[in-house]
Image (cartoon, helix red, strand yellow):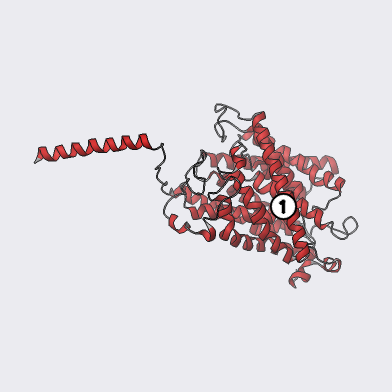
Amino acid sequence: MIQTATGRAACRAVLSRAALSCAALCFPVGAFAATPAIDTGDTAWMLASTALVLLMTIPGLALFYGGMVRKKNVLATLIQSFTICCIVTVVWMVAGYSLAFSTGTPMIGDLSRFMLSGIAANVSKGVDAAFTLGAGSSNATPMTIPESVYMMFQMTFAIITPALIAGAFAERMKFSALCAFTILWSLVVYSPIAHWVWSPLGWVAQFGAIDFAGGTVVHINSGVAGLVTALVLGKRRGLGSDDMSPFNLTYAIVGASLLWVGWFGFNAGSAVGANGRAGMAMLTTQIAAAGGGIAWMVVERFRTGKPTALGIISGAVAGLVAITPAAGFVLPGPALVIGLAAGAVCFWSATWLKHKLGYDDSLDAFGVHGTGGILGALLTGVFAFGPLSATDANPAGYQGSLHQVIAQAEAVMVTIVWCGLLTYVLLKLIDLAIGLRVTPEEELEGLDMVLHGERIN
């Protein structure tokens, strides 16, 4: 009996090895790779990061923008951020997430996750590369967090992007137009660009452009949309003659501080795990923010004679914007260079360029986010470090090269063209349907009372 049992065991072992050998010959490595188990540390970090990014919009951006408008428009500005958060949450759940991150074509995701269909099946396992990160893509990497967490993390990016646009048309857009624009823009502009850049199937990702946390998808996208919206709506009544001083810079400083803290979730969270890349992204984010604040403050001191509170917080945000596409790809030294450059360049864009060209970008959505996003995306190509970079031509040192800069420039141009054209078309359609702008009399009275029947005492 012992010999017989031993013989049977040996026979099974031989057959098992033969079967594995046949499988190795017939199927490529990884064809049956198991969906990763959930890592509790990664999941905890991503839950915290998601909360931090949501904090950036409500209350961070709401207070930042609300403190910079006139008293009669403060509540309307605060409500814009809150309303956009509610609308985009539902839009992202219904179709936005599926269009951006499910499988499909290089141009757009399919609707296999419409209404989050199938997401309940993944509550106890990590995100399978064969679904949300693109089946068949060489860049597909499974993640050790539940899909619900990944979907929610990406939702917070989708929320803040249209909320940033609101800074360009502050104090003059109808509330109904804002709601319609948010729904359409999120689906027609944001979701496709997110798919192109962040899905390994996306055609922009496939030609080698890299964007760690949203230089193109969030900042250039929102900045260009803001510029187009400001041009279509026209200037605020009384600009250049009336007092346009901010109502409460204390609100703006508190809001900027919340943005700074929340940005750690934005950038370090984009490592999608509690790992060394997240740590480096957090460090480079802090350094670039400080560099941006210092650069704006110094340039402003030489230009106007006094460094202002509004200036230093705008500079810090500019540094945060510019480091976003680079945060997980660069070292601390280049991060400081990026931050300093962003503070100086965005000061020029938000002051001299805006006044020279005559457009009314009310709260500098394009001046900071558009300009800073473009600068950061290009400098990512200059300073990307081999061991951190998504590409491996020079794994021992700096990856920055002319080839990478060209790829970055192509991604920037793609974003500008798609966002600019589609934003213009959507605005014109909404204007024809329900109108975009409040009347001159309503603008004079203030949006708080006209649109919401409330005011700050």
Residue at 67% from the left image edge and 52% from the top image edge: 189
Q: Is residue 420 above or below residue 295?
A: below
| Residue 42, percent from left and from top | 47, 47
Q: Nearer the viewer, residue 207 or 245?
A: 207
Q: Amino acid at mark 1?
A: Leu
Mark 1 Cα shell of 10 Å, populated few (<14), some (14-19), many (≥20): some
Give the SS element for disc 1.
helix
- Horizontally, residue 445 falls left or right of residue 122, namely right
Instruction: Give the residue furthest to the right.
Output: 241
| Residue 342, percent from left and from top | 72, 40
Q: Is residue 392 above or below residue 354?
A: above
| Residue 145, percent from left and from top | 47, 50
Residue at 43% from the left image edge and 57% from the top image edge: 121
- Horizontally, residue 454 falls left or right of residue 238, namely left
- Using the rendered view, name the quadrant where residue 165 is placed: bottom right
Q: Nearer the viewer, residue 423 or 163?
A: 423
Instruction: Name the residue that disc number 1 marks.
Output: 422
| Residue 251, percent from left and from top | 72, 58
Residue at 65% from the left image edge and 41% from the top image edge: 323
- Using the rendered view, name the quadrant where residue 451 is placed: bottom right
Instruction: Give the residue furthest to the bottom.
Output: 453
- Considering the image in quadrants, where does the C terminus appear? bottom right
